[in-house]
Image (cartoon, rainbow, N blue to C red):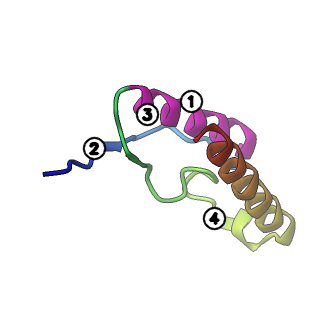
């Protein structure tokens, strides 16, 4: 029977640090894949940090979050 190896990563995100949080997610995803994980999961809002509170009301933060997510997804896809 095929197996699915799942890695659950609890990280310490910093609110608003999109670049730093993305690097942490990338680093822990690499580590999990090296350990044999097929699927890696992070907590909600791992990229933006939690709680974002009033940052979520700023259009510039929303746009930056979306751009950071697209960039992170592209980097993850490029690494396989």
Which corner quadrant of the image does residue 60 belong to? bottom right
Separation of marks 2 and 4 at Cα, in angstroms: 34 Å
Mark 4, secondary structure of its residue? helix
Residue lying at the far left in this picture: please name it: 1
Q: Tell me where residue 69 appears, x and y as whole percent.
A: 69, 56
> At which x and y percent is residue 21?
63, 40
| 58 lies left or right of 28 | right
Check whether the beta carbons of the residues at disc 2 and disc 4 lie within 8 A of each other. Answer: no
Q: Which mark is residue 33?
A: 3
Residue 77 shown left or right of residue 19 in the figure:
left
Disc 2 versus disc 4: nearer the observer: 2
10 Å crowding of disc 2: few (<14), some (14-19), many (20+): few
Residue at mark 4 = 53
Q: Secondary structure at mark 2?
A: loop
Q: CA distance from mark 3 to mark 1?
A: 10 Å
- Which residue is more in the foreground, 62 or 74? 74
Contact (Cβ within 8 Å) of mark 4 with mark 3? no
Q: Earlier in the sequence, mark 4 or mark 3?
A: 3
* Image: 20 above or below 48: above
Q: Is residue 80 magenta?
A: no
């Amino acid at each position: 029977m095929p197996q699915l190896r799942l890695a659950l990563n609890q990280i310490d995100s910093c609110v608003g640090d999109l670049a730093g949080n993305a690097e942490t997610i990338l680093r822990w995803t690499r580590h999990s894949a090296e350990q044999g994980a097929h699927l890696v999961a992070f907590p909600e809002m791992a990229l933006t940090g939690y709680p974002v509170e009033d940052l979520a009301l700023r259009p510039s933060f929303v746009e930056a979050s979306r751009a950071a997510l697209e960039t992170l997804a592209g980097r993850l896809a490029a690494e396989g």
